[in-house]
Amino acid sequence: MTTPSPLNAPLPPGRWALALHGGAGTIARSSAEAEAPYHAGLRAALAAGEAVLVQGGSALDAVVATVVALEDCPLFNAGHGAVFTADETHELDAGLMDGATRAAGALAGVRSLRNPILGALELMRDGRCVLMGGAQAEAWCAARGVVQVDPSYFSTAARRAQLHAVRARDAEAMLLDHHAAALKMGTVGAVARDRHGHLAAATSTGGMTNKRAGRIGDTPLVGAGVWAADGHCAVSTTGTGEHFIRGCVAHDVHARMAYGAQGLVDAAQAAICDALAPLGGSGGLVAVDADGRIAMPYNSTGMYRAWAREGEAAHSAVFEPLFLR
Amino acid sequence: MTTPSPLNAPLPPGRWALALHGGAGTIARSSAEAEAPYHAGLRAALAAGEAVLVQGGSALDAVVATVVALEDCPLFNAGHGAVFTADETHELDAGLMDGATRAAGALAGVRSLRNPILGALELMRDGRCVLMGGAQAEAWCAARGVVQVDPSYFSTAARRAQLHAVRARDAEAMLLDHHAAALKMGTVGAVARDRHGHLAAATSTGGMTNKRAGRIGDTPLVGAGVWAADGHCAVSTTGTGEHFIRGCVAHDVHARMAYGAQGLVDAAQAAICDALAPLGGSGGLVAVDADGRIAMPYNSTGMYRAWAREGEAAHSAVFEPLFLR
């Protein structure tokens, strides 16, 4: 499985690399005009992470800045613009991992943190727990100064219409929105290598439209939805969460590199093809290795994504897989 | 890293193997008389799983029967006899995985399910979610007929004294109970290979004494606290949960076997020594492979455990590591 992508070439030492995703799924092709706002959102989030890295900032700070921008963008399923649960509420999950220390922080089922990834960061910095859930997690974060909002902040008219369409199994209404199918279970995430060679990953989501309240997906789970280890890789996943959990997909990329001597691109592609797909899973991931290589495989029809490396032009894409359909 | 243990020899085809743990930690050596009840509890749980396997039952049913017996035993930190949170409540986590189908089910932070592992099983059988948390998880399980109890059912005088000792940092009181240090963060779990060659794993816990309410440990996390994949291994872990999450320790055993061509015993020992210990983690795991080999490494002073293989005598142990201290 050799790959001709230029992103499979190592960066010169001391250069940064950044990749993000805004969800993967069955995305119908539409006009360039209809896709333009998504590309703009992806590029803006990329720029937020780049701004950290070009100043010599850490991979951790870069992925947090990127994911905050994606959470704030109403087009993607995280933070403002999160999908609705079956109870017509929002339950947000987020997780991050610092490859330098292998520290991690994650939140499940929070309902009032403006940027769940900032709550996860606070938990990681505290260091006593990796994962907290529900109201207690929220209260703990609030006491530490993580900004809370009224839950209506997360709601958008487009997401409410999506919930009603899903409830009515209104296939026609879903198809009218070319992005609906992907975004009803989308996720956002980012991975980075900073100039010092450190890696980090962050993932955030509003979960699945019409999901059962209380369900925790792969997003806040270290090894499933997020993973980072210096010297190996940083990974953020998106797709049918239960399959990513059962395949331990993010750690699977690491394991193929660490124990199977595979390169990042082959390991990432194999994790999607051989660990996720046989379970019936659909989705993709973004990953970066210690040399700044980037891999973005997916087995869905599309994945919202963007990437940049120091000294190379920034890109965003929805289709046009570099490695794999 | 070769190991002379007889458990490293494959079983003849068509024979079953079963191993369980009741927690790992800093366990002070005490008299045989004081240890006897623990051995009796371990043996009774082993017998519950054996009863399934000798009738040709599935590995899944065997690990569930074993963990139910451990949950029902007040000596171990799961179900009846679970430790107290900082709020003087009980929050129970449990997870299981069926190696034959790679299906999994897990619950986090439930407070009224008599046997949390049976709730996890129900969730796995339903198949729509792998992991649910909190009150909604509980309500869903109750609606499906999983037995609920008043939370006082889980409480024992010994655990309440343990909480008070921890709160008072009363080292003397802790030392009087030789098993306190291990059991304040214990877990129970089981792994099995059935006569048909299928593998399964299950893990259950009351968490850590005086833990922050809302904290979710490794127990219900696929890849960290529980893992099973036919053809490779089934794994159940116990110890300092946050380190097991950050090391993705259960899946790490699988990965070393699948991608690094290591045998079960070497892979399990390396997961403890090379994936867990460098993070500062302490604890152990029980694991079984497709040929019925059993590994039970730990890096704490002891681990409550028991094991049996078809045609061989049953054993229980607290110290006397077979492979590793």
Image (spheres, coloured by chain):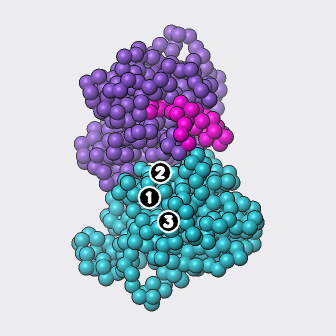
Chain colours: A cyan, B purple
The span from disc 3 to disc 1 (Cα, nearest Å) is: 9 Å
**Viewer-nearest residue: B96 or A297:** A297
What SS does tag 2 mark? loop
**Viewer-nearest residue: B201 or B302:** B201
Could you classify mark 1 by the number of other residues whose Cα lies within 10 Å: few (under 14), some (14-19), or many (20 or more)?
many
**Which mark is nearer the camera, 1 or 2?**
1
Q: Which residue is mark 2?
A: A248
The span from disc 2 to disc 3 (Cα, nearest Å) is: 16 Å
Q: Which residue is mark 1?
A: A273
Corner quadrant of residue A3: bottom right
Quarter occupied by the N terminus of chain B: top right
Identity of the residue drawn at 70% across and 65% down: A194
**Residue B160, image x and y in percent?**
49, 30
Q: Is residue A154 above or below residue B15?
A: below
Q: Which residues are magenta?
A: B260-289
Q: In the visual, does A252 lie left or right of B276?
A: left
Q: Which amino acid type corresponds to the residue marked 1 in the rendered image?
A: Cys
Q: Are marks 1 and 2 on the same chain?
A: yes
Q: Which amino acid type corresponds to the residue marked 3 in the rendered image?
A: Pro
What SS does tag 3 mark? loop
**Residue A148, image x and y in percent?**
53, 66
Identity of the residue drawn at 67% across and 40% down: B278
Q: Is residue B64 above or below residue A66?
A: above
- State the residue lying farthest toward the bottom: A33
**Residue A7, image x and y in percent?**
61, 69
Dots 3, 1 in contact, CB < 8 A: yes
Chain letter of the residue carrying label 3: A
Chain letter of the residue carrying label 2: A
Q: Which residue is mark 3?
A: A297
Dots 2, 3 in contact, CB < 8 A: no
